[in-house]
Image: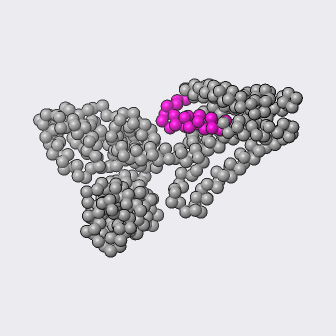
């Protein structure tokens, strides 16, 4: 794609069927860069591009097109083009796309695929969405232990064009049981007359086909693997998970946690229609209304105190706001640690004690600062003292709740990020107001005097 090429240019060439101009625009450019330009077009135009370039030529670019656009574009392709591009895609990408199609459209598509491809898709679709099997590809390089290194390299040359990666080559026996593996470096460096079984690494780290994909991601990151073999209950090799798939999983999980901490539904996208965004956000806002009423009621209980010393109304939001921020700091650190597996059941109490310590320390510091400011502002030492104590108490509560809420949710087998911010913010708002206004009520005669 030349620098001058724009989405409008590409749209016009596709509309006019100018294959030469399209090919020249994409020549010498990485498919990801070409896909970025295609992403600005409509699904009909992307489908037209696939028709013009042909499935085999367009696939390298099409695979980099955003998934939602792929899903919409595939439905505008002719039958032959649709079957062609689906057949050429890697098994894991193919299954992800087919699963998202409506049932009637999916059945029509599957009926036109070759039996082996159709069966492969149906097999992969049987695995739970969050399992290793649902994210694996069946395109992996495989060797027998009795082959010489010379023969193994010849076999690998034949397998390479059809495999997703050949950096790791897996060794299986006659029953396809995983017995070893070699890296491409191992094969290249080994003497050509040696047997694969003599140079392969026998200690193979693998995952079960039903293992949770988040656990697989942690293992691959821990061992710094580019691919992870997947085995069934009888230790037969059934697929591999590549690092690019794990990267996608990690990105999805990070997005999911970010959305849930913000009390958003993970199905919402920036391109979602207005009515759908409203539908997805409104339930959480209704929950927020309930918590806001609780916070308002906690203030209402001390309305007579506020009437007698109006300065409290100006200062109480500071206690609640700092408590909310401190709670979210603690919450973010703990949710991240839980997601990365850094917190075990045995270390839960240490985490909470540490967050209590952080809360107390920050409360002392922030309380001294805001207490000093209030003394200079109002010239009331009792008010400064109450504010200081309230700040310590609320930041202690913030640290405790910021750790307790996600840990409790995990104990209940729920996502630690799910609604955590609502609970923590409510606790610090209500707690902050009760501590601050409660102390002011007890010491009101000193404040007024």
Span of residues in magenta:
323-346
Q: Position of residue 297 (x, y in %)?
A: 79, 43
Left or right, 360 with reference to 49? right
Q: How many numbered marks does the figure carry? A: 0
Give the quarter of the figure containing the C terminus: top right
Q: In the figure, 47 relative to 420: above or below?
A: below
Q: In the figure, 351 relative to 424: above or below?
A: above
Q: Residue at x 36, y 55 (%)?
A: 64
Q: Position of residue 53 (x, y in %)?
A: 28, 66
Q: Position of residue 348 (x, y in %)?
A: 57, 28
Kindly indicate the quadrant of the structure image that contains residue 25: bottom left
Q: Position of residue 295 (x, y in %)?
A: 74, 43
Q: Main secondary structure of the magenta part?
A: helix
User: For residue 369: magenta?
Assistant: no
> In this orientation, does residue 53 appear?
no
Give the quarter of the figure containing the N terminus: bottom left
Kindly indicate the quadrant of the structure image that contains residue 95: bottom left
Q: Residue at x 75, y 29 (%)?
A: 375
Left or right, 150 with reference to 345? left
Closest to the observer: 167 or 39?
A: 39
Q: Residue at x 32, y 49 (%)?
A: 138
> In this orientation, does residue 388 appear?
yes
User: For residue 338: magenta?
Assistant: yes
Left or right, 238 with reference to 275? left
Kindly indicate the quadrant of the structure image that contains residue 100: bottom left
């Amino acid at each position: 794609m030349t620098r001058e090429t724009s989405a409008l240019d590409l749209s016009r060439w596709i509309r006019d069927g100018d294959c030469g101009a399209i090919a020249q625009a994409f020549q010498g450019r990485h498919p990801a860069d070409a896909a970025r330009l295609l992403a600005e077009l409509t699904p009909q135009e992307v489908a037209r591009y696939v028709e013009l370039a042909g499935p085999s030529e367009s696939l390298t670019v099409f695979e980099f097109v955003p998934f939602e656009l792929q899903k919409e574009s595939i439905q505008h392709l002719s039958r032959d083009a649709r079957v062609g591009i689906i057949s050429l895609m890697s098994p894991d990408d193919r299954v992800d796309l087919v699963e998202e199609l409506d049932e009637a459209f999916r059945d029509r598509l599957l009926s036109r695929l070759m039996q082996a491809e159709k069966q492969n898709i149906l097999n992969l679709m049987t695995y739970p969405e969050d399992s290793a099997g649902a994210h694996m590809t069946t395109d992996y390089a495989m060797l027998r232990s009795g082959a010489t290194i010379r023969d193994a390299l010849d076999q690998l040359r034949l397998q390479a064009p059809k495999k997703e990666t050949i950096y790791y080559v897996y060794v299986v026996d006659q029953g396809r049981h995983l017995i070893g593996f070699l890296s491409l470096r191992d094969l290249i460096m080994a003497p050509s007359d040696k047997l694969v079984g003599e140079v392969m690494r026998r200690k193979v780290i693998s995952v079960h086909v039903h293992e949770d994909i988040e656990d697989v991601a942690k293992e691959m990151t821990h061992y710094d693997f580019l691919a992870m073999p997947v085995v069934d209950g009888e230790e037969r090799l059934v697929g591999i998970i590549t690092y690019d798939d794990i990267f996608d999983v990690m990105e999805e999980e990070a997005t999911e946690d970010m959305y849930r901490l913000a009390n958003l539904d993970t199905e919402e996208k920036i391109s979602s229609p207005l009515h759908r965004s409203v539908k997805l956000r409104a339930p959480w806002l209704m929950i927020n209304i309930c918590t806001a009423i609780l916070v308002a009621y906690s203030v209402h209980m001390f309305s007579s105190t506020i009437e007698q010393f109006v300065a409290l109304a100006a200062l109480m939001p500071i206690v609640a706001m700092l408590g909310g921020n401190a709670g979210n700091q603690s919450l973010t650190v703990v949710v991240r640690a839980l997601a990365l597996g850094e917190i075990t059941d045995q270390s839960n109490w240490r985490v909470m004690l540490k967050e209590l310590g952080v809360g107390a320390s920050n409360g002392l510091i922030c309380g001294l600062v805001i207490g000093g400011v209030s003394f200079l502002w109002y010239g009331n030492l009792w008010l400064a003292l109450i504010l200081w104590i309230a700040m310590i108490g609320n930041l202690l509560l913030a640290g405790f709740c910021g750790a307790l809420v996600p840990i409790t949710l995990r104990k209940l087998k729920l996502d630690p990020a799910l609604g955590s911010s609502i609970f923590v913010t409510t606790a610090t708002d209500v707690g902050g107001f009760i501590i601050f206004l409660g102390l002011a009520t007890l010491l009101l005669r000193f404040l007024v005097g």
